Amino acid sequence: MTHTKPHVVNLELAEPQTNRNILNLATEELQTSLHKINLWVKGQFPQPSGHQTSHQTHHALPSRWSVTREALKQLTRGHFSIGDVQSAIMSYNSDYKHKWTFEVLHHYAKRLHKEDNNLELVISKMAKLALDLPDLIKKGVPLLRSQKPKAITLSQQQIACLLANAFFCTFPHRNDTKPGSEYTTFPTINFSSLFGNHPKDALKEGQKAQKLRAIFQYFHTVTNDDPHQPAEAKPDGVVTFERISIPNEKLPKWKNEKKLLRNLHVSSKGSIEKEGSGLLQVDFACKYIGGGVLGTGLVQEEILFLMSPELIVSRLFTEKLDHNECLRITGAQIYSSYSGYSRSFEWAGPHQDMTKRDYWRRRFRQIVAIDALEFKNPKEQYTKDNITRELNKAYVGFQRDPDTPPERLPAIATGNWGCGAFGGDPKLKALIQLMAAAVAERDMAYFTFGNEVLATELQEAYYHLKTNKVTVDKLYKALMDYCGQRERPDLYIFIFKKIGLQISQL
Ligand code: AR6
């Protein structure tokens, strides 16, 4: 059986071959959705029986890609309605004709879309961009599989092309989330879930349509060929996605860690993404990266991903995160600004990102996705296993990249990680992050997101712990004692007493 020789790898690589982060594409497993897409683009997607010759395969299958290509080509010619976009998407997704609805897309087009951004023009350029897939991505992008630390670097143009395909729901095998189906351990990537809405959904149609404003702003920018656009704002760099896994035996032994707390800056005002710019920004993640960004979620992680849609592409290749893993993303650009939060969220306009770029043309912006545990019952968080798990998770996210010298290590910008949708206790989580930062030897800026009481309490607690040179192991032991309490006294006062701090105001 003769197969067409795979095209030469055309992923732009941001790091030199000697760097440990580099993708060794030659040895990557090729069982990836993108590899399959390449076959599918060439009409070679194998039948489930797998008994055909390549010749038969060419002719037996009216390839999904050829149907897709025809549908998208129509859109590149302009003169279409949103109904036509819907029909185009459904033409190669007919299995979902009774499942997918498009009222949010229609809502956006009718009520939210501004005439100055010609929607038809943007969508036709997006179709063109999606059709560039075979030219822009010539080899399968490897999957970032569980427990396999690895990095992928893509050009912003490749990301835009992949996201245009996600918008038009062209990725095969990625719509079925039933247990046992091929990609159940991966997040979804096709945008179908953004277009429809159910009356019982957490967001109303109009609220969900705000997400589309951010998405279209992104596509408007990446397809913008206006020569007057400032060169610094152009999305012509690269972005690195790195899965980090630390084996259990290499995780800190918390009860023996003698490190002192590092510097802490606490503020009740400001946000991680704005005031924390230039620092390592924490994404309060879901283990399925991006959480509900393509559905009804609209809290910290989803908003982050909507402001920087390049982050969404990580859903294509990042398998769900395990307890000892995180995803670190370097170089993503910001395209929009927002106001409000959750149900009051609104897209607030375009953002021109002039952030400088590094040697590899990545914007100086690093985000680390760490997923906290979700506590339906708040009591569950005060156990040795759960506290240790959260310490480990934070440590994995904060750990220094061995290539960065300690003196050039940015501080961490974080806040109430795990304390909104996931129901955690912010006083406990702040302490856990502070301990993990101490072991990772990084300073921290903590944004309490308007909670002034928490800001004051945290500042005071930190002051006493720092001036009394309390080490991580002591804090860990005090936390373990706290877990054993029947009642839940104030966490910080309990710890001070346990450690024997003489504090006059107690
Ligand atoms: N800057 C600083 N603090 C913030 C910001 C911000 N931009 N946004 C929110 N906060 P949450 P979780 C504060 O609920 O509990 C998503 O669906 C604010 O106090 O987003 O870890 C993910 O995909 C807020 O209450 O994080 C996961 O599935 C708190 O941070 C899940 O939610 C927690 O924000 C994660 O839930």
Image (cartoon, rainbow, N blue to C red):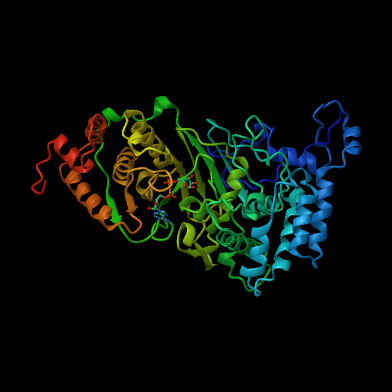
Residue 141: % across, % down: 66, 41
Q: Which residue sits at x=30%, y=39%? A: 435
Residue 323 sits above or below residue 359 on the image: above
Q: Is residue 126 left or right of residue 364?
A: right
Residue 384: % across, % down: 32, 29
**Foreground pick, 466 / 349:** 349
Q: On the rendered image, what quadrant is the N terminus found in?
A: top right
* Name of the residue lying farthest toward the front: 199
Q: Is residue 498 visible?
A: yes
Q: Which residue sits at x=66%, y=46%? A: 11
Tell me the quarter of the picture where residue 397 sits. Answer: top left
Residue 444 sits above or below residue 106 on the image: above
Residue 153: % across, % down: 59, 46
Q: Which residue sits at x=36%, y=32%? A: 386
Q: Is residue 333 visible?
A: no
**Foreground pick, 449 / 147:** 449
Q: Which residue sits at x=12%, y=36%? A: 500
**Foreground pick, 460 / 347:** 347
Q: Is residue 161 left or right of residue 427?
A: right
Residue 52: % across, % down: 87, 28
